[in-house]
Every structure is written in structure tokens, then in C-alpha cells.
Amino acid sequence: MTPHVLIIGAGLSGLNCALELQKKDIPFTILDSSDAVGGRIRTDNIDGFRLDRGFQIFLTAYPEARAVLDYDELNLHSFRPGAMVRLNGKFRLLSDPLRRPQDVFSTLFSGVGTLRDKLKVAMMRRTQDGSMSTGPETSIMEKLQTTWGFSAGMIDSFFKPFLGGITLDENLGTSSRFFDFVMGMFTKGKASFPAGGMQAIPEQMAAKLPAESIILKARVTAINGSHEVILEDGRRFEGSHVVLATGMTDALALDPGATERTWNGTTCHYFAADAAPFNEPVLLLNGEPGRSSGSINSIVVPSNVAPGYAPKGQHLICLSSIGVDESDASKHRERVLTEAASWFGDEVSTWRHLQTYRITHALPRMDTLPDSPPIRVLDSGIIQCGDHLSTSSINGALASGRHAADHLQQTL
Ligand SMILES: Cc1cc2nc3c(=O)[nH]c(=O)nc-3n(C[C@H](O)[C@H](O)[C@H](O)COP(=O)(O)OP(=O)(O)OC[C@H]3O[C@@H](n4cnc5c(N)ncnc54)[C@H](O)[C@@H]3O)c2cc1C
């Protein structure tokens, strides 16, 4: 059969598989059930505000992204390194002394962690270059407590909201290998937003592919053998190979042999305001010892980082929590607004609610991370890729898609 790869899913893994196949002159078609490319990376435009579907950031040091994306065209706007931490009723600056020496004193005496903790952070940063350790795998919590010996206060008021927000795992049971990787990415690059919102990332990738190779609103409901896919509307596509790049739960519905891990979720409420609650392009973390599950984990004003996220003269505010509260969305919104009012006072009552995203399937849990290549060839012959076979991140999804294309080249 003439080679023609059917890729199910136009998220980052499916798009990167297609870009790599294009380089190798292997023909392909991408089918996606959604109305646009991007999968979990989508941005809604509401009243002139850009709302990413769940708070996400792009780390410029991601090695896979460096190879694929044009950063200048994305017009990246960066966060200030470090974070503000809300602790014991005050906002405290925890900056990156290597990048912002002018903040060294406020960081050292911020009251977040001890002086020894700050020295340990500096030492840790020197050892983490972003490569994933091949040594014994443990949890992030274990590594912070035992290997590095951070104080309970530092773990609770900084690492839990910071790394818990990245992994959506507030107990920090996530693999220490991911910790090494992601801390290295923060050391080597910047946290940023594309000017046009996070969806600009998959859109840039899709723009490099022939328009006719991407078929949207095309939900695959069955795969016949490993060569033919059948759509919800009855259409059939035949190819030489099938790549399953659907995200793990949808993959299971199409092939029961597909890999699954459990999901971590998040809730994100967006508000519009005439004035921002703070003016710095910084991540604000909830380090209060009294916070509980479902509390605010972080607050960002995306328009402080990338002004295009809000219309001129207005601001966009994003309140994120780890997990998805069982209660209805409006009750959770009231709860986080009350919390925000205790930080910022009456101005919170002027915020206008724009949208809430409750995302139960946000990130595949990463309790362990295998050393093996981030793809699976299923018993059916179908090739599976996606972030759940790598790190649950933009970098992981891109790496997995690239490996799927390499595997196909070898097979052909
Ligand atoms: C709220 C949130 C915050 C995040 N924060 C960050 C962050 O800060 N930094 C970071 O690096 N990563 C972050 N991520 C992770 C990152 O977005 C993902 O790792 C990555 O986008 C996954 O890409 P993927 O291609 O593996 O899967 P997906 O993006 O899930 O793509 C799967 C695609 O398959 C399609 N599909 C599914 N079933 C079918 C079917 N039956 N037929 C046809 N098409 C189908 C879907 O429509 C979708 O487009 C975050 C994710 C979320 C949700």
C-alpha cells in the first residue's frame, strides 16, 4: 500500500507528528473532532479578552519547542522571574536573584522560607539543567524534604502552590524526574505568553501544513484494523498507518489497548476589571497555611504580561485552583472571590465575570516517568502518541509526536 498516515488528533502531538512527516516526504491527513486545532491549548475571544482555556504558560527553554516554533513570530511576552507569595496576610516577593540582583534583599528577607532555603534554591538551580535524572525516581515531595532538606515552611508556602500549580497535584506526588526537568526549564528560559494567546502555538504549527491536510469537525468513532478510520458522520478514510494522538481517554475509546494514566484537573475563573489588583507581570501564589483544597492556588493578570490579552484600558484577571470542585461553578466562583476580597479589598466587587473553565482532564498524572521513547505501538499496529506517554507538557506532547514520525519513517 502507498504510504499515507492518518493522524487522529490535531493537538500538539498530532501536529508535530505531521510536521515531521512533511519533512520526511511521507503523506498524511489529520482528522480532529474539534472546530480548530490545538487540543488542550485553545484561546477563546470574549468581548475583546483572550481567555486561554485554563491557565497555561509557555516555557521558552523547552527543547522541542525551540526546534519547531518561531518565537519572534509568536511575539512572546515574559513573566518576571520568581513569584509573589501571599503569606500571613502580606504579599512577599520571591525573585530570582541571578536574573534580578536588584531584588536580592527583598527575596532574602521575604519571610518565605529561611535563609538556608534560599541558599539551597541557588545550589539546586546550579545542578538542574533540564535533563531528566536517570537515578532513582521518587516524588517531588520526597526530593524536596529528603534530598534537599527544605523547611516545611518553604515547601508549604512556595513549592506547594508553585509546583502544585504546574503539575495540578497539590500533594507533590509527581515524579522527581519531572521536577528536575521543569525546574531546569525555569532556570534556562522564561515563562511567557504569546501575544495572541496560547492557541497561537498550535496555529503557527498548523499554518506550516497544507490546509487540505487538516480536516476539522471530523470525529473518529472507530478504527478498522490499523488502516481504516470511520467518522461519526459515516465517512471513511483509508491509509497505510494510523497514529492515535487523541489524548489518553479518547484513545481508549478507539483502542482498548491504549495507555491510560489518571488525570489531574483545574478550575480557572476569568474576570475583567478597569484596574488590575497588582501591576507587575508576575505570578501570585497562595502560600497561606490556612488554604484548603479548592482555594485560590494562583492569580495572574495576563494583561500585565501581554497587554493584548485585554482591550485597551481594561485588565484580565485569572484565578486558578487545583482540581475541580464538586459543587457548582458559581458556588466555587463565590468562594474564590471572597478569598480574593480578603486580599485586595472592595475593588474585587467591581470585577466582571467573563468565563469559568472546569477542566477535569487537564494533565495526565506523572507519578512515574518511563525512560522509554514516548510512543507506543499497540497490539493492533496503531501508533499512539501524546503527552501521557511523555511529560504532561507542551514539550512532552511535541516530543511524542516527533518520535511517532521517526518510528513511521523506520517502519516504511
Ligand atoms: C489547563 C491546562 C493547563 C496546562 N498548563 C500547561 C503549562 O503551563 N505548560 C505546559 O507545558 N503544558 C501545559 N498543559 C499541558 C499541554 O497543554 C498538553 O500537554 C498538550 O497540549 C497535550 O497535547 P496532545 O496532543 O498530547 O493532546 P491534546 O491536546 O489533548 O490533543 C488531542 C486532540 O485529539 C482530538 N480528538 C480526541 N478524540 C478524537 C476523536 N475521536 N476523533 C478526532 N479527534 C479527536 C481532540 O479534539 C484534540 O484536538 C496544560 C494543559 C491544560 C489543559
Image (cartoon, grey):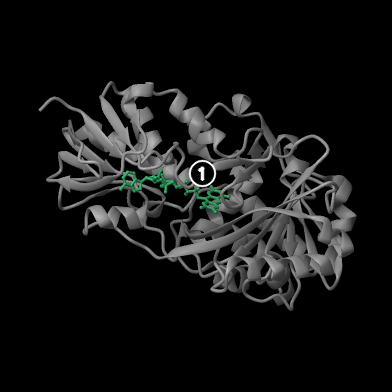
**Placement of 76 over or under 363, stated as above or below:** above
Residue at image location 67% in from the left, 70% down from the top = 295
Residue at image location 60% in from the left, 29% down from the top = 74
Please, what is the three-letter code of the amino acid marked with disc 1? Answer: Ile
332 or 394: nearer the eye?
A: 332
- Using the rendered view, name the quadrant where residue 191 is placed: top right
Q: Position of residue 231 (x, y in %)?
A: 24, 42
Quadrant where the N terminus sits is top left
Determine whether, in the image, residue 341 is placed left or right of residue 63: right
Residue at image location 31% in from the left, 28% down from the top = 21
Judging from the image, what secondary structure is the residue with disc 1 in?
A: loop
Asked if residue 109 can be seen in this view, the reply is no
Asked if residue 322 can be seen in this view, the reply is yes
Q: Is mark 1 within 8 Å of ligand 1?
A: yes
Determine whether, in the image, residue 215 is placed left or right of residue 256: right
- Using the rendered view, name the quadrant where residue 310 is placed: top right
Quadrant where the C terminus sits is top left
The residue singled out by tag 1 in the image is: 41
Q: Position of residue 36 (x, y in %)?
A: 45, 36
Residue lying furthest left: 1
Q: Position of residue 328 (x, y in %)?
A: 57, 70
**Placement of 229 over or under 350, stated as above or below:** above
Residue at image location 78% in from the left, 44% down from the top = 315
271 or 166: nearer the eye?
A: 271
Q: Position of residue 174 (x, y in %)?
A: 50, 65
Q: Residues within 10 Å of mark 1 (few under 14, many from 20)?
A: many
Q: How many marks?
A: 1
124 or 193: nearer the eye?
A: 193
Determine whether, in the image, residue 122 is placed left or right of residue 342: left
